[in-house]
Structure formats: C-alpha cells, structure tokens
Image (tube, coloured by chain):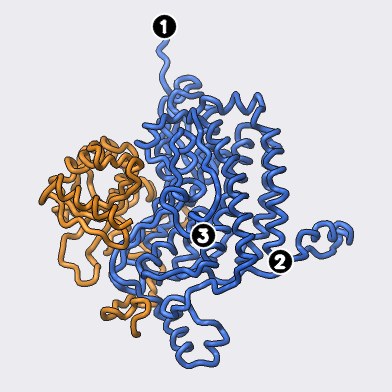
Amino acid sequence: MAEIKNYTINFGPQHPAAHGVLRLVLELDGEVVVRADPHIGLLHRGTEKLAETRTWVQTVPYLDRLDYVSMMCNEHAYCMAVEKLLGIEVPLRAQYIRVMMDEVMRVGNHLLNVGTHALDVGAMTMVLYTFREREDLMDVSEAVTGGRLHSNYYRPGGVYRDLPDRMPKYVENKFKNADDVRELNKAREGSLLDFLDDFTQRFPAYVDDYETLLTDNRVWKQRTVGVGVVSPERALQLGCTGPMLRGSGIEWDLRKKQPYEVYDRMDFDVPVGVNGDCYDRYLVRIEEMRQSNRIIRQCIEWLRKNPGPVITENHKVAPPSRAAMKSNMEELIHHFKLFTEGMHVPAGEVYAGIEHPKGEFGVWAVSDGANKPYRLKFRSPGFAHLAAMNEMATGHMIADVTAIIGTIDLVLGDTDR
Amino acid sequence: MSTKHEQLCQQLADVFGDKVVNPFVDNNEVKVDVAAADYLSIMSQLRDRHEFSFEQMMDLSGIDYSAYHEWSGKRFAAAVHLLSIKHNRRLRVRVFAEDEEFPVLASITQLWNCANWYEREAFDLFGMHFDGHDDLRRILTDYGFVGHPFRKDFPVSGYVEMRYDAEQKRVVYQPVTIEPREVTPRIVREDQYGKAGGRG
C-alpha cells in the first residue's frame, strides 16, 4: 500500500477570504486540516512603538488604524486609559455621545462581519444588503467626525466636537435626477440625531430581512452548525472575549459586568449562545445588533433633551474654544502649550478595557510623567482569537477554514497592530 | 468598589505572604509584583485557588524600563493581566527578569493556553525568553528580522529598509536612508506640573 504523506498549503497572504493579509500555513491530510499555523505580522506597523514618540493626543489617530472597522471603540479604550491616569471627569453629554457612537460602530462592525462571513461561505447576496445599511452608518460617521473610516473623534476628556445639527445632502447630477435626490434626502432634512433616529426605526426590519436570508437557510446552517466548536472551558483558556465567549454560553459583557461611561443607565440584554459553534456566534451577533439599536435609541432620546459641554473644561488636557483663545491671554498660553508640548500625564500605569464589537479591547498605558507615553500595549481581541485558530480548525475540512476565519471576525490591522 | 480591591490585596497577602511584593490599589486596579523564581507557582495558584480563580489571562506584555525617568530597578519585566469571571475582578502581576543580558521567565502557556502568542510577541519585540515554551518563534516582525524592535535602544526608524532593485530584479535590504527626527521632545516636568487642576 502506498504511503500517503500530509501536505502543506499556503492560504493567503492575498486571499479574498483571509480578510486582509493573513498567511495561513495549513497541513492537510486529504481534505482534512491537521494543523493550521497562522503567520501574522504582515500588517505590523509598530503602533505601540510609534506612540512612544508621539504626544498623548497625537496617538489618537493611530488607534483608528488598528481595527479600522470599529475605529471609535479603539479610541474609546485609549481615552479611558488616559483619563484614568489623569483622574479627570468626562462631561455627561460626551459620555452619551461615546456610548452612542460605540454602538453605531458595533452595528457597523457586525454588519460587515455577517455580510462578509456569508460571502465567504457562498451567500453572495448578504453583503449587498448589509453594506447598504453600513453606508448609512458611514454617513453618520462622516457627519459627526468628518471621516468615514478614520474618525479621530474621541479625546482624553470628552469628544472633539458636538454632534452636527444638519446632515450633508445629496445634490443633483447627471446620474441622479431631482426626484431621486429628493427621495434620498428625505431622512437628511433634520439634524444628525433625526437621521440616526430614522435609521433605528428602519433597522429592525432590515435585521429581519437578514434573518430571512440566513437564519433558517439550509446551506448556511450546513456550513456553520457544528463548525469551529469552542467549549466554555476552552473559550476561557484560549482568552476568547466578546461574541466568541458569549457564543460558547458564558454570559460576560463588560458593558454589564464592569460598566463604563453610562452603560449602567442603558436598558439592554446580552445574548448568549449554547453550542459555541459558528452558527451560535452568528445568532449572537444578530441579536447584538438589535440590542445596540435599542441603546442608540435611548441615547438619542437623552441627547435631544440635554445639551451641554462635550469636552472637559480643564485646559491642561483639552484646548480652550477658538473664540476664547483669540481673545484671552491665558487661553492662548494653554492652547500653545497643549499643541506644542502636549499634556503631561502623571506617572503610573493603568489598564482600561472596553467591550469592543470583537471582544475585549484593552489598553495598558505606562507613563513616567512625560508628555509622551512610556509604553502602550493594546490588547486586541483578534490576537487571542486567531491564536485559537489552530484548535478550532483542526479536524475540519479545508472549506471550513474560511467559515472559521469569518466567525473570528478578523481584522488584521487589529491583530497585527 | 474599592473594598473589593482591598479584599483582594488582603487575600494575596494572606495566601502568599512575603512572596508578593506590596499588593496595592492604584487607579482603581490591583497590582502586584512577584519574583521571577516564584512566578510560575504563584500564577498556578492564582488560577486554581477558589478565592482567586482567575480563569482568563487577558494580556501579557513585555516592557523595557531602561529609559524610564529616574529608574533604578531591573530592565525587563512582563506584566500579566488576569481576569476572574467568577469574582468579576482583575489583577495585574508584574515580574522582573533577573538577567538583563538574557532575560528569562517561566512560561505560563500550560496554565493559560492563550499565553502562547503573547509570549511569542514579548520574545519577538523585547527578546525575552520563556522557559518551557515549546514554540518560541518570532510573530510580528518580518521573516529573518534582526534585533528586538521594542527595546528602548532600538531606533524607531530601524536599521534596514527594503526596496526593489531593478538591476538585480529582486527585493533587497539596505541601511535606512531616512534621518530620525523628533518634532516634540520628550520632557518630564517637576511634580504636580501636569496634574489636572494643578498650577502650571
């Protein structure tokens, strides 16, 4: 009898299902995966090292480039860490804005994940629907921060500016006539909050549509049920967080268990899976979108009623207003010092973790009292999840590897840092 | 909230005695230093004893203290962030490597399997070795990379750069051609300077 040897194949770094530049060395026995060895670091930009040579505020935009799908959540963890070191309070309105934008990011992140996961396993249509809704959320991001993907919006001490009171509108051109434009601008007549409110009213029906397409879909279930099973004990051992942990049946959500900002005032539920397979994690994400929608609605209601400052008045940390800077000597000095030398953060170390859409995103910040971080460490959820890849993929067919990569919700910018 | 942290400090002191150095609450977090020799046994008790039961290792990261303002201690340390889901609390354990030339720590991969990649990362970026780790390869840097980039004596711009050589028709490495440039110098001011609300 002929001796059959295992063979290795190279998956990626340029592969449409690799979600970026992931190189996966797969050892196969026929079609069955014996060993999966992810090679990461192809997108490593040394963000933590770069941050050591930048002032505390200059680091914020780098955070957008980690997980570029839910950028504001990254900024959130970093700003929380700096605020904890400084011991400053964030105005309540800024806390509500942060919670609302975090949830907008969560919906956007899960839309991308569910859409591309389905695309990877062969359901072409999903991504068209989810990206339609993502486009609205990108418009929200653009209206609020000025950037669709790189927002640079949160600051230690609050957020950069208040929510805009009008939305950008479509204009007539040779592709869109007046009627089309009027239809497109219908939701954009009011403020940003009106636009988002309109979105949250439409959104539950969209989620129902996604569920019609996938939840009972025979092919989808064949590709995801029983694939990439992680038991609760293994999930803890492997450092899984977020939907990866909840999909395995452990009810752990930092928003509930260690509430930050105003999450303790929000009314929402935490969905938990049972079997810990790709299908359960998909269901968890779908339900999280519905719950995020609820949180956004509560935030909109509060934000409409309660105007106020959105960044701390402490000018050692946050710049004074433009008008005050132009007319007042002391404000001018503050402004100058802040933008040349930057703020000084008291010596110490702190860890701030938030419930990022992908899991727990943590920032360990060490300061020696300088105007720059001494050491920053980002604990990105994808890093631990990808490390669990070998265990999840072993014993499955090679076609299931793409399903498992999809369920990890991999963004290499976040994993490689 | 703070009583929960103080309770954990007390438990640490009760169980480990003088093996743990000064557990204390700082910025609403509990942190503790342990010696490299006791590291593995303390970690395994932190996981297994029911009053601690830290089921999850959230993060392990290296740090190089050589450029720290007025630092006199050892150079390399690893900080491990633990999370107990049962008790809903966190702990940061910091352990210094004894030798600066060849920093070695025990590997905790057997206790928490996810430590595998985190230790590889600390090895890659700081050159810290983990005794008992069976697969200590580089993880984030390029294949064939020389040096440990997150050490403080490693320049931000690195030593080599990569370009395509049209004559040789392949990618070649050459010494970096960019000049290091510091726009804002690093300054440590006197006490209370940067403290929010303090006089400036």
Which chain is orange in the picture? Answer: B
Locate residue A170 relative to residue A403 in the image: left or right.
right
Which chain is blue in the picture? Answer: A
**Residue B139 at x, y percent in the picture:** 36, 45
| Mark 2 nearby-residue class (10 Å; few <14, some 14–19, many ≥20) | some
Work out whether residue A75 or residue B84 is closer to the camera in this orientation and state it: B84
Tell me if I can see residue A266 in this picture. yes
**Residue A185 at x, y percent in the picture:** 80, 61
- Say what secondary structure mark 1 lies in: loop
Q: Is residue A270 above or below residue A334?
A: above
Q: Which residue bears the numbered disc 2?
A: A191
Return the mark for residue A15.
Answer: none
- Say what secondary structure mark 2 lies in: loop
Q: Which residue bears the numbered disc 1?
A: A1
**Residue B102 at x, y percent in the picture:** 17, 51
Q: Quadrant of the N terminus of chain B?
A: bottom left
Locate residue A249 relative to residue A373 in the image: left or right.
right
Q: CA distance from mark 1 to mark 2?
A: 75 Å
Q: Quadrant of the C terminus of chain B?
A: bottom left
| Mark 1 nearby-residue class (10 Å; few <14, some 14–19, many ≥20) | few
Which chain is home to disc 1?
A
| Amino acid, disc 2 | Ser
Q: Which residue bears the numbered disc 3?
A: A64
Foreground tag (1 vs 2): 2
- The residue depicted at 55 percent of the width and 47 percent of the height is A268
